[in-house]
Amino acid sequence: MRVICVAGARPNYMKVKPVMDALEERGAQVILVHTGQHYDPAMSDVFFADLCIRRPDYFLGAGSGTHAVQTCRVMTAFEPLAAELAPDVVVVVGDVNSTLACALVTAKLGAPLAHVEAGLRSRDRSMPEEINRLVTDRVSDYLFAPSADAVANLRAEGYGQEQIHLVGNVMVDTLLANASRAAAGGTLARLGLRPGQYGLVTVHRPANVDDPAVLGALLPALAEISRSCPLVLPAHPRAAGRLHSAGLPAGVRIIPPAGYLDFIALEASARLVLTDSGGVQEETTVLGVPCLTLRDSTERPITLTEGTNQLVGRDPDRIVKAALEVLAAPPPRPGNPALWDGQAGQRIAAALVAGHDARSQRVASLPERRSGSATSRSSTHRSPAVGLLPESIEETLR
């Protein structure tokens, strides 16, 4: 069984690792393709090292660009490679541009496609990630959902029951596998921090950092919070320069970008976290750290209902009020959503191997054809788990 696993950006690495490991344990030939969407060492190499991910088999070198340019570069580089490798299945994870690009290529080549983190919906189509999720799910054969709400979304959108697999959260697999390593790494000591005596801030979404008015309103809120709890904010030099130019408060300390293990150590020992990241909402839920999400919507509502997360939007008064309430209350207990138990990668691998075996048996049972007869590749190679597909992608986006 030959499997292509695609990773291209920082959020992908933590998600693809447990799937790769579980597939290789089952004897699959796993080919790792790095699209190069994130290529800076601080956004790529350090994560491969921290997570002990082997070197990619192929690096596509897509680089940065507009959404259209980046997606196009990944598609034109991945298409000939996928056609040459002729995989039994392609696995894409998350919702970045590389996910969408490789999903479209795979679907048009007729190979089975698996989407890890299927069914997440923010219902905010101003977010590029939401468009990527919708389209990727629509062309996928295997929909690996991390939570019951994601399953409900997929059922409501008309997908076949045989496509949908509730498997748990692969990011939690990686978190649980590395939490002790992160705790033993001495991160807090190197930065002069004490457990529970600081807050952690992460902001990266364009809606928060590219709009001077929004950023200008956010910083006074951070200043007010920092009077009660000093804040640390990992940032690249360019982002740090933008924050300083906007008037970074004295109580907010910029630190260099953190690798995976350092960031988990910072997260686990923080008194609270303020973020606009999706994955951080999940990690704080498992770690039992209060999380204030600086957005008006989330594609991970289970972190609100069963976790430690609150949506506070971008209104400064609301942010400060929520933070002060968190600081005045005892730390919450860790959340425990169903199947967030460190075994999601194993469930995904088991489903993929079972699907491949079923396809192989079906092909073996077909009447023998003459060598010159035309056989559609998709008729024998496509996953049995294909549900309702629309006439066009535009139908999904209407």
Image (cartoon, rainbow, N blue to C red):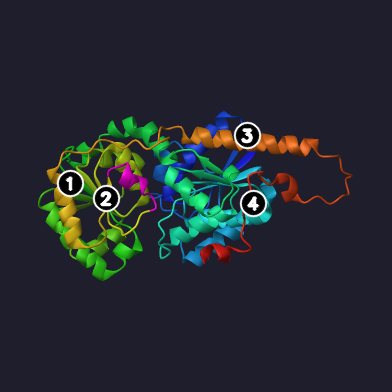
Up/down of 340 relative to 372, above or below: above
**How dense is the environment of label 4, judged by Cα within 10 Å: few (below 14), some, or many (20 and up)?**
few
- For marks 4 and 1 on the same chain, the one whose residue lies earlier in the sequence: 4
Badge 4 is on which residue? 81
Q: Say whether marks 3 and 4 touch (CB < 8 Å).
A: no
Q: Amino acid at mark 4?
A: Leu
Quadrant of the drawing holding the N terminus: top right
Badge 2 is on which residue? 310
Residues at marks 4 and 1, CA–CA distance in whole angstroms: 50 Å
- For marks 1 and 2 on the same chain, the one whose residue lies earlier in the sequence: 2
Q: Say whether marks 1 and 3 touch (CB < 8 Å).
A: no
Residues at marks 1 and 2, CA–CA distance in whole angstroms: 10 Å
- For marks 3 and 2 on the same chain, the one whose residue lies earlier in the sequence: 2
Please tell me in which quadrant of the rendered image residue 186 appears: top left
Magenta: main secondary structure: loop
Q: Which residues are magenta?
A: 299-308
For label 1, the SS is helix
Out of 97 and 290, give the one closest to the viewer: 290
Out of 36 and 305, give the one closest to the viewer: 305
Badge 3 is on which residue? 354
Q: Is residue 289 visible?
A: yes
Q: Amino acid at mark 3?
A: Ala
Badge 1 is on which residue? 326
Q: Say whether marks 1 and 2 touch (CB < 8 Å).
A: yes
Question: Mark 2, mark 4: which one is toward the viewer?
Answer: 2
For label 3, the SS is helix
Left or right, 103 with respect to 128, comes to right
